[in-house]
Image: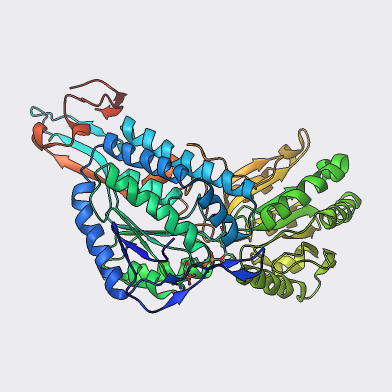
């Protein structure tokens, strides 16, 4: 580990601003000194990315697949050093580090398969009709093409799977876009190791220099310079609403505005219907105590809001979940700043009028560990006070007690956009709550039946996104192979000579991909 930046394939550290990462478990700084990228280094990295794009955008799917698979292999080759660095910079256990590495590798390989196969470009051909009356029709052929250099801001809570070589990077590289990573300061060492794997893979598979850069920073300036740069064409972000919104506004103010795909806050409402509560409140309480505290609550899909209709069963549930959650051993948070944010936001909620605390872990705990808590409030208060709608990033949940089904519907309709919504119901119960379900569908990207929102499967049918502020563009997912669509644009060729067209659109269909020809999906040649 060098603490340096990767400006394309070269290590560089000409700056003077330095910082270290922090081991929250040991409550001490790690040793490596990281050097923040300078303005000149950022400029060089962006220029290299723009130059690399000219070649990278035309590279075949097979070659890109080789590159993505080589990144996966090089990450695996980092072996224990990567796992130990991950743990020392996040306080997360080894099992989680290995799980996240597996997810990262899986994502890279699934994008490799996607681009090697090739049909993802959605090739669409409408053949010419020279004899059409009253006007002849031209030959029009459309496919998806990459946007250009993409800036990726990794997530603090996923040092591997949603960071340097995480979902955004894998999808952008697969699409043919060079990537500039704004390294997350909390796990800069994990980031540098993964960056070294990407650079090795790029060299081994003959990718142009500049296809990838990794820029260190411990403040907002590096990210802002990157997003404002005219040669950058899109941004991927995972983090706070404040950070994502600042970047969205910055991108919109550019002479050429660019898309920012930010995945931000979510409190993931869970609606618990009366019969389910009556029949199995104890079981639901146990399951939810586990889901709320999983990974110290540091998941974008953490269930931060449970909603029910006032009844004896709801009271029993509140008592049971409060009892269960206190039994769980607290765990370490990612960084003292995340712990500080958790404590501040929790206190902000607790200090609001008519909020009752039903569980609060008070035994002595280690530094940077999180005390889990549950609070409750009535539906009317929740509707009137939007401070209560804030995300508390950590092992915390609020239970809203509504007076009836119509107040439940109103509470849901007044929520900000969310990544997920969950319904806990017993047989046939859901049909009595169709308005509630419709209201929920209108606010979320994914709806879950009798489960927990934590645990995001990486697969083609997954939607990880939702109405603002869950994400800045609810038409796209941040997880799964369809996330590639964030980094491309549709492009049409009109009457273009066959031999000059990309292979995907040529008559011969030498790649045997699925295409839509005159309205029919087929692998046939023309
Ligand atoms: P963050 O504060 O949003 O920062 C994420 C990244 O964006 C960092 O690299 C940060 O750079 C950069 N950044 C933030 N504000 C910026 C701005 N105005 N201009 C340019 N760059 C900016 O998130 P975090 O540090 O990862 O975690 C803090 C909080 O975010 C958590 O407590 C939690 O509330 C939330 N969070 C939510 C999720 C979710 O999925 N819902 C996931 C992770 C975090 P620097 O750090 O270098 O300043």
The percent position of residue 61, horizontal first and vertical second, equals 28, 36
Total labels: the figure holds 0
Question: Residue at 81% of width from left, 46% of height from top?
Answer: 286
When the figure is inspected, residue 355 is found, relative to residue 501, above or below; the finding is: below
The percent position of residue 359, horizontal first and vertical second, equals 84, 62
Q: Nearer the viewer, residue 66 or 11?
A: 11
Instruction: Give 412 or 28, whichever is nearer the viewer.
Output: 28
Does the rendering let one see residue 325? yes
Q: Residue at x 28, y 56 (%)?
A: 9
The quadrant holding residue 397 is bottom right
- Residue 420: x %, y % from top left: 61, 49
Q: Quadrant of residue 520?
A: top left
- Residue 59: which quarter of the image? top left
Looking at the rendered image, the quarter that the N terminus falls into is bottom left
Residues 335 and 56: in front is 335
Residue 231 visible (yes or no): no
Residue 273 screen position, x and y as percent: 78, 45
């Amino acid at each position: 580990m060098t603490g340096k930046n990767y400006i394309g394939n070269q290590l560089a550290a000409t700056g003077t601003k330095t910082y270290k990462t922090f081991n929250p478990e040991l409550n001490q700084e790690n040793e490596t000194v990281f050097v923040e990228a300078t303005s000149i280094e950022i400029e060089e990295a962006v220029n290299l990315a723009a130059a690399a794009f000219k070649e990278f955008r035309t590279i075949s799917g097979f070659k890109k697949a080789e590159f993505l698979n080589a990144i996966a292999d090089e990450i695996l080759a980092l072996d224990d050093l990567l796992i130990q660095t991950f743990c020392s910079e996040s306080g997360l256990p080894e099992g989680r580090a290995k799980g996240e590495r597996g997810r990262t590798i899986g994502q890279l390989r699934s994008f490799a398969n996607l681009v090697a196969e090739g049909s993802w470009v959605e090739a669409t051909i409408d053949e010419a009709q020279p004899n059409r009356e009253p006007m002849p029709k031209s030959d029009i052929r459309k496919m998806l093409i990459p946007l250009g250099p993409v800036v990726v801001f990794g997530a603090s809570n996923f040092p591997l799977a949603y960071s340097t070589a995480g979902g955004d990077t894998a999808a952008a590289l697969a699409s043919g876009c060079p990537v500039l990573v704004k390294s997350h300061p909390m796990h800069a060492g994990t980031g540098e190791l993964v960056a070294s794997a990407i650079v090795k893979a790029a060299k081994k598979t003959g990718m142009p220099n500049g296809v990838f850069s990794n820029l260190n920073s411990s403040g907002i300036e590096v990210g802002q310079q990157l997003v404002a740069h005219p040669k950058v064409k899109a941004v991927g972000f995972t983090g706070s609403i404040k950070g994502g919104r600042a970047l969205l506004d910055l991108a919109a103010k550019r002479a050429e505005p660019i898309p920012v795909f930010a995945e931000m806050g979510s409190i993931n409402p869970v609606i618990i219907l009366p019969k389910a509560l009556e029949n199995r409140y104890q079981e639901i309480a146990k399951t939810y105590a586990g889901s709320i505290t999983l990974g110290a609550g540091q998941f974008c899909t953490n269930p931060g809001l449970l909603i029910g209709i006032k009844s004896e069963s709801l009271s029993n549930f509140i008592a049971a979940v409060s009892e269960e959650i206190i039994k769980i051993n607290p765990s370490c948070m990612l960084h003292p700043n995340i712990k500080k944010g958790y404590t501040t936001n929790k206190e902000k909620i607790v200090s609001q009028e008519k909020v009752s605390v039903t569980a609060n872990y008070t035994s002595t705990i280690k530094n940077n560990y999180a005390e889990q808590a549950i609070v409750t409030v009535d539906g009317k208060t929740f509707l009137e006070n939007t401070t209560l709608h804030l995300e508390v990033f950590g092992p915390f949940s609020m239970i809203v007690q509504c007076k009836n089904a119509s107040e439940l519907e109103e509470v849901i309709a007044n929520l900000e956009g969310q990544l997920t919504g969950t319904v806990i119901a017993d047989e046939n119960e859901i049909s009595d709550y169709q308005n509630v379900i419709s209201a929920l569908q209108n606010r979320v990207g994914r709806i879950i039946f009798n489960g927990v929102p934590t645990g995001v499967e990486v697969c083609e049918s997954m939607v990880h996104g939702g109405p603002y502020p869950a994400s800045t563009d609810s038409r796209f997912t941040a997880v799964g192979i369809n996330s590639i669509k964030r980094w491309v644009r549709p492009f049409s060729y009109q009457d273009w000579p066959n031999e000059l067209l990309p292979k995907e659109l040529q008559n011969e269909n030498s790649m045997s991909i699925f295409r839509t020809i005159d309205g029919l999906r087929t692998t046939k040649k023309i």
